[in-house]
Amino acid sequence: MPDSARVPDRPTLDGLEERWAKVWDAEGTYRFDRTARRADVFSIDTPPPTVSGALHMGHVFSYTQTDLIARYRRMRGKTVFYPIGWDDNGLPTERRVQVTYGVQCDPTLPYDPDFTPPERPGKTPVKISRRNFVELCHRQTAVDEQAYEALWRRVGLSVDWSHLYTTIGDRARATAQRGFLNALARGDAYPLDGPTLWDVTFGTAVAQAELEDRERPGAFHRLRFGEFFIETTRPELLPACVALVAHPDDERFRPHFGTTVRTPLFDVEVPLLAHPLADPEKGTGLVMLCTFGDLNDVTWWRELDLPTRTVIQRNGRLALEPPPGVADDDYAPIAGLTVHQAREKIVTLLRTSGRLDGEPRPVEHAVKFYEKGDKPLEIVGTRQWYIRNGGRSPELRAALVARGRELEWTPPFMRARYEHWVEGLTGDWVISRQRFFGVPIPLWYHLDADGRPVYDEPIVPESLPMDPSSDTPPGFEEVDRGQPGGFIGDPDVMDTWATSSLSPQIVGGWLDDPDLFDRVFPMDLRPQSHEIIRTWLFATVLRAHTEHGVLPWRRATIAGWILDPDRKKLAKSKGNAQDSPEHILTRFGADAVRYWAASARPGVDTAFDTNQMKVGRRLAVKLLNASRFVLGFGNRSSAEGVDQAGVNSRSSAEGIDQAGVNSRSSAEGIGQPGTDIGAPDPALVTEPVDRALLGALSTVVEEATAAFEAFDYARALERTEQFFWSFCDDYLELVKARAYGEAGPSEVESARAALAVALSTLLRLFAPFLPYVTEEVWSWWQRGSVHRAPWPTPPLVADATPLALAASVLGAIRKAKSSSQQSMRAEVALLTVAGPVDALSRLRADLTAAGNVRDWSVSEAPSLSVTVTL
């Protein structure tokens, strides 16, 4: 046992987080060792959280679970590469800047070096240049990222902060642009003029992976096309109609395939065609194909080789000019109207003309939205950049499905979500966005003599990162920008996922640090939540497969969601993330919050539960008090009165957490592997109950280790905690007198050695879950950091039965005293026990002291029975 002067008289949780966080940072406790061989490295591709205001408890939940794995692997002897980054470009940041500063980007405006945002945002946003807008984005993200880092440090994430990155930083921009240029050279990236999913609010293209269905009220309108009827919820698209489509086996229409009909109101001749995607059971079985109402229209239009009559523009209004084949006079009443206005006008005209059969029939139906948007998506014709993702290539799709089966999944059933997504792709990944704060498409284009872009021969940069809006291509000057015979830069930026999908390459130094990249890639672990399997996980697999021919990591662990009391996902966008992490951490402490997060099974949705945090805090306090009790043996004066302090009662454990701390303020050599001071020797453990304790603890170590190896941290915590409470409630009480010295030298030595071995083992088992309190207790009697100490091995192979037997007898004594409403110190006049006599005789001394037993009566019996006479 250590010098008791290092053990505080009244241990407390107060101040541990701030104190130990400073020590860990100063000593580089979690710093990655760049000299480690790849075989000795465990590398983690940590999610870069989106910088868009504040983190919520759902983030704390999932990121803590990743940290549990990192800490365990570090204690298992791995050199853990555990970086973190911020996803700071993209629409969430732009929206936050617009609201915070009351501005709106207008890329046609010149840069104003003296621009200052208004002190208070007005009702009408101030229009500013793209460069001014980007500067505000950088300014805002810098503030938000400081708050993010402070929170993660307080939670106790054992990341290496020297590897912090941002998705708008130089390395990330260069990596994303190199990935794009390599894809372009391979033919995996290509431009296309065609139908594009479009968010009219943000004015940008949207990828299939960013869609979500929302139930919205609508109405079916029954329209007459000559002798035929169709039903549609979008009558405003009637001037965009290019065909009617039915299923090829639909007997109602088979005789008419290949004939034509004329559209109501606009009198345009369109064909009646067959396509297997048409549903005979839906509506009339006949579909009005427009360019474009939904993704089916795009498929039919492409496969049936139909003309284009686009009417909806990027601003969400109908075009001022009619589409081909539509007369000016017929189109004039709806020219320039919003979609809603055009729908109302068309319905009125149909009703007046007699082409509306009956009245519109109300319906609730799924409408596609951009996941961050407020208005339904439209499909408009634009020029966009795409990356091949298997949506149009069965061979690539099959290869990506195979990659998913090569990947190890935790939990395993999450693989089905990946496969469902890949097999359901209908088109390639549109990566260009008509936004401002992002990684630019790294290309310029020649302008011909008339000032028109020559898109077929893009100009590729010589160095990266670059911005085509401010940098000039080789052989040109800035004065040539926009001039005939000169050049223009590509105006678009990349989808933020086009950068985040390269997170292993970014943090691993693919372009600028090949030595590091060889030590960490492919990485060992990708932790993330399940709703972004279709975006981040899939896109990262795609990029690594096409760029490197490998998986980006060996395993993916998928976290569940945190749910509110109504079983809805906790999210800022849903307005149900009310309690800030800072408030919760102040109220319960980081170790308690981590306990709550660690108690959830991998991949399982979990309720936000402060009661679990209360349990976690009681556990942390109990660990302080029980450790002080154990370390006080050998110095009786420092240990007396511990019962009153709550060591032997869970319910009273909170009462001790009031006084100041009398422990050292820093740790010696904390960055080095831990070394025991007078390391306890299990060979000194000779008494049956002591050996039984270590035998039971050995089973716990084996089970916790197996659980962590299976990434089931919740099981590891559950088994460790169960043992710990039994250790406090039963074993400490059984051996207290003997550990104080009330026995022969060998018996005393056995108890103290068992206690030391148990405490050392338990602290290391708890360390991934409760990093602050375990580090504090470790500092009382060990050198270095518990988080650099080796993961425990089973201390002793021994029969655990004697401990269970003694606990059963002690439990019967306690129950009898409690039922009689007597003190636990009350004397037992006679203890009558039937059971294994030899085993009971070896436990008699400890049970006599623990139960204050005056006399015994023992008899042999096949099963245990206990009678207590007070």
Image: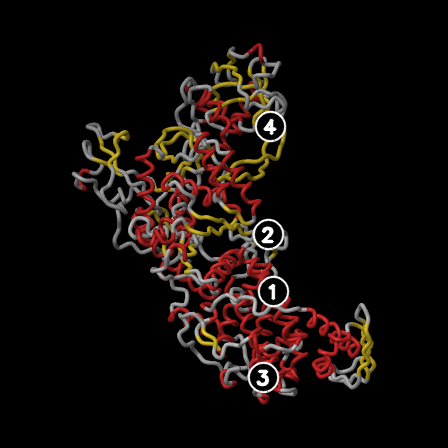
Proximity of marks 1 and 2: CB atoms separated by less than 8 Å: no
Q: Residue at 49% x, 28% y: name it.
A: 293
Q: Kindly identify the amino acid type of the residue bearing the numbered disc 1.
A: Val
Q: Which mark is residue 549?
A: none
| Foreground pick, 268 / 433 | 433
- CA separation in Å, label 2 and label 4: 38 Å
Q: Kindly identify the amino acid type of the residue bearing the numbered disc 4.
A: Phe
Position of residue 298 in the picture relative to residue 186 (left or right) = right
- Sequence-wise, the earlier of marks 3 and 2 is 2
- Sequence-wise, the earlier of marks 1 and 4 is 4
- Sequence-wise, the earlier of marks 3 and 1 is 3
Q: Whole-percent x and y of residue 188?
A: 36, 34
Q: Kindly identify the amino acid type of the residue bearing the numbered disc 3.
A: Phe
- In this rendering, the label closer to the viewer, 3 or 2: 3
Q: Which residue is mark 1?
A: 700
- CA separation in Å, label 1 and label 4: 63 Å
Category of crowding for the residue at label 2, using alpha-carbon neighbours closer than 10 angstroms: few (below 14), some (14–19), many (at least 20)? some
Q: Residue at 64% x, 70% y: name it.
A: 725
What kind of element bears circle 2? loop
> Quadrant location of residue 24?
bottom left
Q: Which residue is mark 3?
A: 633
Q: Which residue is mark 2?
A: 605
Q: Which residue is mark 4?
A: 220
What kind of element bears circle 1? helix
